[in-house]
Amino acid sequence: MGGMSRWLDVEAATDDIDINSLPSNLALTDLENDNEYKLIIGDLGKGEEGPRLKIFKGAMQLSDIALPDLPLGVESIYTSDSKPRTLPLIAVAFSSCIYIYRNLKLFYKYYLPTMELNSSEMEIWKQLTDPVNHKEEKVYALTDSLHNMPQKVLSSQSRHFLELTLEQQLEFLDNAELPKKTLSEISCMTTLRMCSVDKYAMSCLVLGTEDGELIVLDPQTFTQIHLARLCTVKRTPYQIVATGLYNVDYRITVATREKSVCLLKREWKEGRLLFNTDDNIVAMEVMTTDNSVMVISTDGTLACYSRKGKKVWSISLEHRPVAMTLLPIMHLGVTLTAVALSSGHVHLYEGKARRDTIYVRDVVSVMKFGQLGQEEHVFTIITANGNLMLKILKRTANFNAHAAGIEPTISATVGQKPWLIPKKSKLFLEQSMRERENAIPMHTNFQHELNRLRLLSARTLLEAHTKSENSIGAGNMEPIRLSAEVEGLGPVFRVTLIVENTSTDKAVLGLSILFLVHSTAYKVYNPYVKVPLISPGNQLKFPAKVEEIFGENLNPDIFFRNVTGQAGEGSLIRVLLLKDGKSNPVLAATVTMPPDLTTFQNVS
């Protein structure tokens, strides 16, 4: 895939950086409106260290903020399109709420709407809170009833109660109360532009909940402006990708934990199933050019689906995929798909054609591509060991098929910009109608002309093979080339024959040259030449003296022929290249002799 790397590596202090994060917890944003993009990471923490929000300038950490719970997603949004630009807000999603940060300080808290408790669960808790039932047999039976209920419909108090031992449960019930209304929990989060595609345009938050609902929040008041169910059958969203504009038209593509992908469009109250996959989905991305969906699954495949859910192609990966992200490179007009494998390799695909490979010597956990600092194309990689790697795309990098060292195919053009096809003209419509009315006769004529062309080609090939009229060897003599040069004004000419061995590892011997003159108009002083051994890659020149002979009765065709030498076969000399042990010539060349200019001047 090319001998020179297309990326510049940025050194990071691996001893001081230890990151434990998720793909949804990375964001690149211009925090101070100075065109100096920062890397914001929601760190889950390790060991005694709790979750924190970390801000990086390049590979250097600037600050961090303690978080109250494990972050589920980190996004940056602009709440206004006014000039001068306002500072972006940082949204961090937790289990049932979203913290909004301005200037890295807590600005607002949004909680998901409460949900009514399940009636069966409430009946069980009424019995559990009754002191009469505080016996091991009763508690065990009621706990078993809670176990039989789906985990998704249980309140947080019930889920916590089921995690306790029997002794702890009896102690908990001494002061227990009936569970209150539960809060829906967030499963994923993304952003959607409101009315402009500008990177600094106002955006709204799109939330996916564990109950299979999608919530769109107003960017200024953080209130619910749209609520829709994901599908008719309850499905849990796992990853959301939003394209388009909320006030114009948009598509929200959602990957679920039930091996399916759903679609929600503008003003839909309920989404629709787009397609199902054979195995669980690891990651999903949507191409902005044609809204095709790229999916990597646990069965080790990378698949592409059309915007209508039809499977376009699928390729098997060398190892298990662990992460995926898009690499839009605007100045090259391409959008690559980066797929990280468990072997430590990161493959970059354009369609299903591999364009580049990066090896990171560790398993990739999180990938993100975009502007960082003042560099527009930075590939951010976080490994499973917590290392931070930054790779800057060189300005001279090229990802076309020739630069990648592969042949372009039709399938490799998936994801490119569509061609600009003009509208159908009146002439085109008339021609189309004529073709439909006369389809059978036109097809018959086409087959007839095609057979005539094949017959003519076969006859020409047979004639050339019979006469050996070819100047480049084929078959066993493939590395031999024969050519001729004519010098002089006449009547004596110098004809130089050039025999070239085009092979790089095979010598040629046993050759000879024979001049064949069809008339008595020319005399060759050395008509037969023995060719010595020709080493690989070399050529030999054999000069020959040829004299034009004029009799007492001059032929006008020869005497007054033009300077192009067109005087029939009388001005032609054939040169045959012979091979020992073969009856037919190996190669042949025809030399057209020029007119004798000295005789022409004397006559004039």
Image (tube, rainbow, N blue to C red):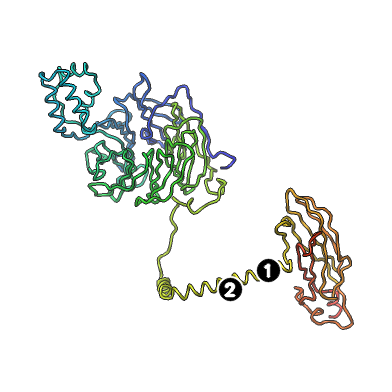
Can the viewer see residue 82?
Answer: no
Label number found at residue 12: none
Identify the residue position indicated by label 2 in the image: 452
- Of mark 2 and mark 1, the one earlier in the sequence is 2
Q: Position of residue 266 (x, y in %)?
A: 27, 49
**Label 2 crowding class (10 Å Cα cut-off): few <14, some 14-19, many 20+?**
few
Q: Nearer the viewer, residue 478 or 377?
A: 478
* Residue furthest front in the image: 137
Residue 178: quarter of image: top left
**Residue at (36%, 44%) from the top-left corner?**
277
Figure check: 451 above or below 184: below
Q: Position of residue 85 (x, y in %)?
A: 33, 40
Q: Position of residue 594 (x, y in %)?
A: 79, 72
Q: Position of residue 223 (x, y in %)?
A: 22, 38
Which element type, helix, strand or loop, lies under badge 1? helix
Identify the residue position indicated by label 1 in the image: 462
